[in-house]
């Protein structure tokens, strides 16, 4: 059964949430999807600051002619299917090819692609053209690719620009690009990835508020992990705080959210973990899959559990300064809900505050009655000669740093 041809109106409706900046980033993702390492964005403007043309080029593998329809697949899907694909790929790194090539209508009337790909020991090139009025149609399917000495890659040029000025592209767009790609450039920093706008490469380090490099070794297996912690000075566009696992060739193997959920504390972070251990690692295998464990590492490995515990502890320490305001709010909340006794002493309040800063989960996972019991027990311990039990209790839950151990000791003197 042939696929339904979606109309130009249907495409616009399905992609109505896109704005020019977001549309432009889709073409950059297209390049990275095609295994490019360098993306160049160039634009020209007239004396009034109006943009005359924009081009985005990459050094990826190009668009093989026999894959052209696959790359523009959403043109042959229903509006509902297109919306589902958009939702599925909203924050994905890969798989944006089809959708990205439809969004130029938000800022331009015309789009022209020139692509070079390698096939049968030769490089071939051809052109594709589409316009915003008939965005469900495009040329190139009947083109005859010709041989070329040019390197593989794709350049898309936009004309009939509207809704963008040179001032926007020189300032606001670069800020948007940093928030979109900073984590990706940091992830691929050893592979010389770059995004260059009118000759100037954007610098992901310009929005780093804090960073630190660590080296961990699992003593029993001598497995070494190289860690790169980054805290961003602002929220990234569509990428939450994640762990990125990287192999010895500096290539990402897997990514997943860190255990910390940002609840307004502005602790925006990324953790890049590189090790030869991830060269052969099954991230999706079940812990009980012994056959898989003989071939590759799994999450049940002692060294992986060691790594995750260390990562969590590093983030806990890094996060603590951001929790001070939340700890103050917790005390106010406890007072309003009569969880804290009206005659609560300062040392009890300070103990609760410090414990929250060290491990907020101790408090956030409790119901009202449990909170009252915990506060009551802390009060009893503080009034007794058993205050060392508080530090011992907490030490059994989390790994305290020497400074934190000293802080608790001083508190209970």
Image (cartoon, grey):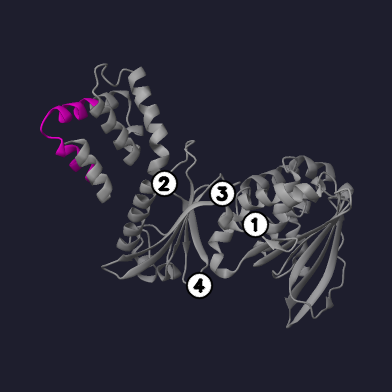
Judging by the rendered image, the residue that carries numbered circle 3 is 239
Circle 2: element type: loop
- Report how far apart the C-alphas of labels 3 and 4 lie in the structure: 23 Å
In front: 294, or 376?
376
- Labelled pair 2, 1 in contact (Cβ < 8 Å): no
Q: In the image, is residue 163 above or below residue 352?
A: below
Judging by the rendered image, the residue that carries numbered circle 2 is 259
Residue 213 horizontal side relative to residue 61, left or right: left
Instruction: Name which of mark 1 and mark 4 comes first in the sequence.
Output: 1
- Labelled pair 1, 4 in contact (Cβ < 8 Å): no
Circle 1: element type: loop
Circle 4: element type: loop
Please provide percent x and percent y for residue 151. Answer: 75, 76
Quadrant housing residue 112: bottom right
Q: Residue at x 54, y 61 (%)?
A: 187
- Report how far apart the C-alphas of labels 4 and 2 lie in the structure: 26 Å
Please provide percent x and percent y for residue 52. Answer: 87, 54
The segment highlighted magenta reads 375-395
Judging by the rendered image, the residue that carries numbered circle 1 is 95
């Amino acid at each position: 059964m042939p696929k339904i041809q979606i109309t130009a109106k249907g495409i616009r409706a399905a992609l109505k949430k896109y704005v020019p900046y977001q549309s432009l980033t889709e073409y950059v993702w297209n390049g990275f999807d095609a295994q490019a390492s360098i993306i160049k964005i160039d634009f020209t403007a007239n004396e009034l600051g109006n943009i005359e043309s924009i081009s985005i080029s990459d050094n990826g593998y190009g668009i093989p002619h026999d894959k052209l329809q696959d790359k523009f697949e959403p043109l042959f899907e229903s509006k509902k299917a297109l919306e589902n694909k958009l939702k599925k790929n909203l924050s994905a790194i890969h798989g944006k090819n089809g959708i990205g090539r439809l969004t130029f209508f938000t800022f331009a009337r015309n789009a022209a692609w020139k692509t070079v790909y390698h096939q049968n020991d030769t490089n071939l090139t051809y052109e594709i053209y589409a316009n915003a009025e008939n965005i469900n149609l495009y040329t190139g399917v009947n083109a005859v690719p010709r041989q070329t000495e040019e390197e593989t890659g794709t350049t898309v040029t936009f004309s009939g620009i509207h809704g963008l000025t040179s001032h926007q592209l020189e300032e606001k767009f670069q800020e948007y690009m940093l928030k979109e790609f900073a984590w990706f450039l940091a992830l691929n920093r050893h592979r010389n990835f770059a995004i260059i706008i009118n000759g100037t490469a954007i610098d992901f380090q310009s929005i780093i508020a804090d960073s630190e490099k660590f080296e961990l070794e699992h003593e029993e297996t001598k497995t070494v992990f190289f860690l790169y912690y980054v805290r961003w000075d602002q929220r990234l566009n569509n990428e939450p705080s994640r762990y990125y696992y990287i192999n010895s060739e500096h290539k990402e193997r897997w990514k997943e959210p860190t255990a910390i959920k940002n609840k307004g504390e502005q602790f925006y972070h990324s953790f890049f973990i590189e090790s030869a251990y991830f060269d052969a690692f099954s991230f999706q295998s079940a812990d009980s899959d012994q056959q898989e464990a003989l071939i590759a590492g799994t999450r049940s490995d002692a060294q992986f559990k060691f790594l995750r515990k260390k990562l969590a502890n590093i983030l806990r320490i890094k996060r603590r300064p951001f929790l001070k305001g939340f700890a103050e709010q917790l005390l106010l909340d406890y007072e309003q809900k009569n969880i804290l006794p009206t005659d609560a002493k300062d040392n009890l309040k300070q103990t609760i505050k410090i414990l929250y800063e060290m491990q907020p989960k101790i408090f956030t996972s409790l119901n009202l009655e449990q909170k009252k019991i915990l506060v009551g027990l802390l009060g009893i311990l503080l009034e007794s000669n058993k205050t060392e039990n508080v530090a011992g209790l907490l030490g059994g839950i989390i790994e305290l740093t020497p400074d934190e151990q000293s802080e608790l000791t001083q508190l209970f003197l």
